[in-house]
Image (cartoon, helix red, strand yellow):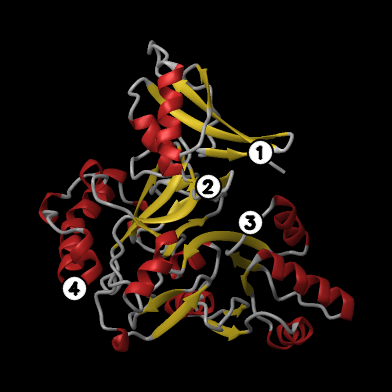
Amino acid sequence: MTEYYDALETRPPEVREAALFAALPAQIAHAQARAPGFARLLAGVEAAAITSRAALAQLPLVRKSDLIEAQKAMRPFAGFNAIAPGRLARIFQSPGPIYDPEGRGTDWWRLARALHAAGFRPGELIHNTFSYHMTPAGSIFETGAHALGCAVFPAGVGQTEQQVRAIADLGPVGYAGTPSFLGLLLDKAREIGVAIPSLTKGLVSGEAYPETARARFAEAGISVLQCYATADVGLIAYETRPRGGLVQDEGVLVELVRPGTGDPVGEGEVGEVVVTSFNPDYPLIRFATGDLSQFLDGPSPCGRTNRRLKGWLGRADQTTKVKGMFVHPSQVAEIVRRYPGIECARLVVEREGENDRMTLVCALDPGAAEPAVAALQETIQAVTKLRGAVRFVASGGLPNDGKVIDDTRA
């Protein structure tokens, strides 16, 4: 097997883009025809016309944060499934609860590509510590390992001493799980005096992967990369060698949008990760993950040509409560929409003594005149039902971190 999982990874970017948008109209039509939730959400949309990013950006979002209530109204998947639940391989429950399907196809979650990039090869044994109970992470990684030709020890979480002894007995070459649990296994191995030298590689996900953990694993002789996957769409992006951000998976189309809206951010800006999946069983169109990230410029040093994400940069759902009232990023977006001269804005929430204070900090387009403060304050109160101050800064005067609401209260 070569350095790359397949030839898709090194396609010219324009060829990949053309292929994705050639396939997109059929996927949208399939979702409209087979998934009642999308038939309702995309009613009136001409699927054949969605052949560009600009056209795709006009479609409504499916927000992960809305799935709990949507699934309550239509069990189990809010009508976004295009296959009957009884024809699936498994149904999982993520916190919320949110119910997630798994179909019967090979590598349904598309994790084999990320495992290959992390150095795994056919015939190897992987120690999989992702949970197999109710949530899909264990199955996500196991089915990817099987598609790659690897065997799996289904360890799950807990029982660290028993797991360490199993690693010593079976000699797996690699680890799959969270970085924190790998740290626990290394601690337990040292505590009980059991060597586990067979572990030389790993693929982690599910939580932040700090450089301190990466250095610790390298010191232990384990080269560990990370991937970004969710229970809804499977693999989204994965790390490669040499490191240089997370390369997008070939089976999804990724956008970054301004939190609270479905509008794509400008080049280089932080935005919410929105994924369109080409999975026929669960054809999620413009699925807003709630995660923030940023596109990196230029090609990956590994030679793969897909776009790269910087990694997880926080949560897009920055809803907060001020004086007993919820304030949402979408409300900030609505205020900005009413004033064309505002480039972007951030609502800063502070505590002054025993009182909450809101200030809308507005970055103005170059050359734009400042809107009347009194009118803007009236709009803030009309939209949020709360009073707020206003402050203006020059174009580019707000940090590029994806924040729309900055709650600074302790």
- Tell me the distance, in whole angstroms, between the alpha carbons under discs 2 and 3: 31 Å
Give the foreground label among 3 and 1. 1
Give the foreground label among 2 and 4. 2
Q: Which residue occupies the foreground of this view, 240 or 46?
A: 46
- Tell me the distance, in whole angstroms, between the alpha carbons under discs 1 and 4: 46 Å
How far across and how far down the image is residue 268, in percent?
A: 45, 34
Residue where numbered disc 4 is placed: 34
Residue where numbered disc 1 is placed: 408
Mark number displayed over residue 325: 2
Residue where numbered disc 3 is placed: 208
Q: Measuring 43% from the left and 50% from the top, which residue is drawn there? A: 273
How far across and how far down the image is residue 310, in percent?
A: 52, 45
**Quadrant assignment for the N terminus:** bottom left
Give the foreground label among 1 and 2. 2
Q: Measuring 46% from the left and 75% from the top, which residue is drawn there? A: 144
Say whether disc 1 or disc 4 marks the residue closer to the N-terminus.
4
Q: Measuring 33% from the left and 40% from the top, which residue is drawn there? A: 263
At label 1, the amino acid type is: Thr
Q: Which residue occupies the foreground of this view, 102 or 161?
A: 102
